[in-house]
Image: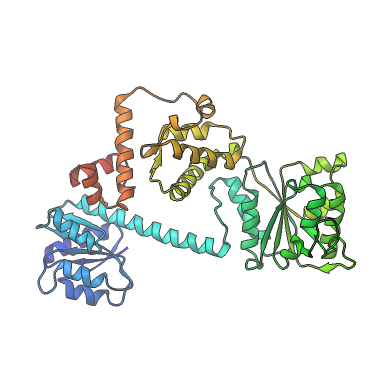
Amino acid sequence: MKILIVDDEPALRHTLSIILSDDGHTTASACNGEEALAALAPGGVDLVLCDLRMPRLGGLEFLERYTQREKRALVIMMSAYGDYDTAITAMQRGAYDFIPKPFKADEVRLVVQKAAERERLRARVQRLEGELSALAGGEIVGRSAVMRTAVELARKVAPHPSATLITGESGTGKELIARLIHDAGPRAKRPFVAINCGALPEALLESELFGHVKGAFTGAVVDKKGLFEEAHRGTLFLDELGELPLALQVKLLRALQEDEVRPLGATASRTVDVRVVAATNRDLAADVKSGRFRDDLYYRINVVTIALPPLRERREDIPDLASHFLARHNKRMSLDVQEIAAGAMRVLVGYAWPGNVRELENVIERALVLTTGSAIEPEHLPEALCATAPATVGFSVKKETATLERNLIQRALAATEGNRTRAAHLLELSHRALLYKIREYGLGQ
């Protein structure tokens, strides 16, 4: 990072410059707040280390004037006169952190390292938000290689009109992938229309897909557009395609081949421009062999296949998914459950999840309803899950105490956005004791 050191003591500026330069940072210096503001005018500084008491323009006054600017670097205040009230004042005026003098070189390094990590994370978040904005990919959560492969394939197929078949067990997120394909493609501003082909009887399903005209059947008192027409120039998502009756498979094939539909009771066809994405939890290739699914429709719809793995085959995604659902339902139910305890997470990761991601979300929502504390514990999970969990609970007081202490420090740092002064206050520790424990548990990496 490029760091500006603001202090009226030349020796301290020189010392800090040596310490930070040895760590690979670029430094500049100013002897008071006015000189610092002038140095910051062109921009390009990532961090400011600023003394509290200086002639002409002190640290708090500098901070107040600087934070009014549109572009702000992180500011860390330093003072031999500071106490907790002064630190709070500095935080209220926009400081990122506060270092009391005198301090050791390692303390400065730790504070700067945390600031650098925050800036890296901020830059990463901005980059990811930009990618997600470009993709408009919805809430697809997963870092496993198989999910990355599926998402990347969806991204590749999105710009093209080719029919796509998404396969996978129920609850694996097939509609999310379909929405990603729609949102990342040229039809993003057009309708995304979804229908479950197994949810309606054949007569109603035909009317839903292709529409009908007035008088086509008893109860058809007005003309009705079908979903193909509703999705004109957009995307039609046919969920559970394998449940489509054979008679409708013929009509669907014609619509895909001719780009036109004929509503029930109509004498003429209507042209449609629809991108079709289908999904199924069945083995359509086997259904083709058995005669249950038409081979010509299978090959027409199966231009590109995206296979979604069951959750039991990507267990590394379970912690991220569980945390995602925790945040979602916390917000929806106006709760403030802060975490999933380590024991509960072991249960979640060890379970087979026959209902996949949908079942996991239901379990997290249920646990939130039952939780009265700040964390989801194993007793808040269904008995069926806990019965399959491996016995990993130990009896070491020392290890369990260290785990508890580490988790509390992590939670305090998260609650204060990495600010150690406020975290120490929450934990009822001295600032120096907290720094020691951060190093001991490797939380400053």
How many numbered discs, if any? Answer: 0
- What kind of colouring is applied to the model shown? rainbow
273 w.r.t. 23: above or below: below
Q: Position of residue 189 (x, y in %)?
A: 63, 68
Q: Position of residue 367 (x, y in %)?
A: 46, 37
Nearest the camera: 329 or 302? Answer: 329
Quadrant of residue 341 within the rendered picture: top left
Q: Position of residue 442 (x, y in %)?
A: 32, 42
Residue depicted at x 38% and y 24%? 394
Nearest the camera: 155 or 291? Answer: 291
In the rendered image, the residue lying farthest to the right is 267
Q: Is residue 189 left or right of residue 224?
A: left
279 w.r.t. 440: above or below: below
Residue depicted at x 65% and y 65%? 185
User: Is residue 29 at all visible to an observer of this figure?
Assistant: no
In the rendered image, the residue lying farthest to the top is 395
- If the image is split into quadrants, where does the N terminus sit? bottom left
Q: Is residue 295 left or right of residue 337?
A: right
Nearest the camera: 217 or 239? Answer: 217
Q: Position of residue 437 (x, y in %)?
A: 25, 40
User: Is residue 179 at all visible to an observer of this figure?
Assistant: yes
Residue depicted at x 78% and y 67%? 272
